[in-house]
Image (cartoon, rainbow, N blue to C red):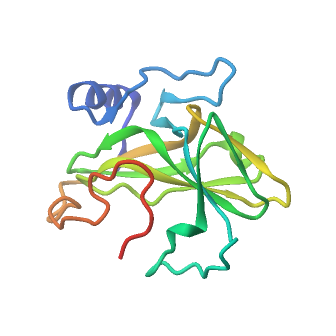
Amino acid sequence: MAIMPDTWIRDMATSKAMIDPFVEAQRREGVISYGVSSYGYDARVSDEFKIFTNVNSAVVDPKNFVEESFVERQASECIIPPNSFVLARTVEYFRIPRDILVICLGKSTYARCGIIVNVTPLEPEWEGHVTLEFSNTTPLPAKVYANEGACQFLFLKGEGPPEVSYADRAGKYMKQRGITLPRL
């Protein structure tokens, strides 16, 4: 498995709309960086947030997730309560090629503040907005900035295409738009 360089990412984003909208070079002017880097793409978080709250004393159940456990906000920044989390989505819409697996790592700027970004791998031929989870591991409120870098995606090319892709098996998160809650 090889990690794909900036030239490949740029070519696939512009010729195959793999990343839309696409930022050709890293932007850093007073913001948390985003755009293409040497071996990855730093995606931005949109201005849509679902902030976890337990005002309804709900149980977190991945098989029966209660949407009322979230407060929705659209803003240029989001405050994550202490020891809580926020769901958001990428600004970018991704279309993953059949022979590529994408893994995601959080930005060090957030990690150094106790804010962890979690994303599961983007499988071959998956497409959609990526739902992001920001966990505030601190005992203090933490801030996330919309339209700035949130995480870095790394594109790994397999030795060959898989026998069955995410699209082939009609995965439940295929072509998701907006923030997508757990599905069974």
Q: Foreground: 73 or 135?
A: 73
4 vs 59, nearest the viewer: 59
Classify 111 as above or below 36: below
Where is residue 182, by image quadrant? bottom left
Q: Position of residue 152 (x, y in %)?
A: 52, 42
Residue 44 horizontal side relative to residue 33, left or right: left
Residue 173, picture quadrant: bottom left
Q: Is residue 157 visible?
A: no
Decide: is 112 above or below 86. above
Image coordinates of residue 144 in percent, x first then y, are 67, 42
Q: Position of residue 113 (x, y in %)?
A: 78, 47
Name, please, the residue furthest toward the top. 29
Closer to the camera in the image, 22 or 67: 67
Depicted 142 relative to depicted 5: above or below: below
Residue 36 image offset from top left, x and y in percent? 46, 28
Residue drawn where x is 59% and y is 62% of the image: 70
Determine the residue positioned at 71% across, 63% down. Answer: 84
Query: Which quadrant would the C terminus be assigned to in this image?
Result: bottom left
Q: In the displayed structure, would residue 177 be above or below residue 119?
A: above
Tell me: 44 left or right of 63: right
Q: Residue at x 57, y 49 (%)?
A: 49
Which residue corresponds to the image point at 62% horizontal and 79% vertical from the top-left?
A: 58
Count of marks, rendered view = 0
**Residue 115 appears left or right of 159:** right
Do we see residue 60 in this rendering? Answer: yes
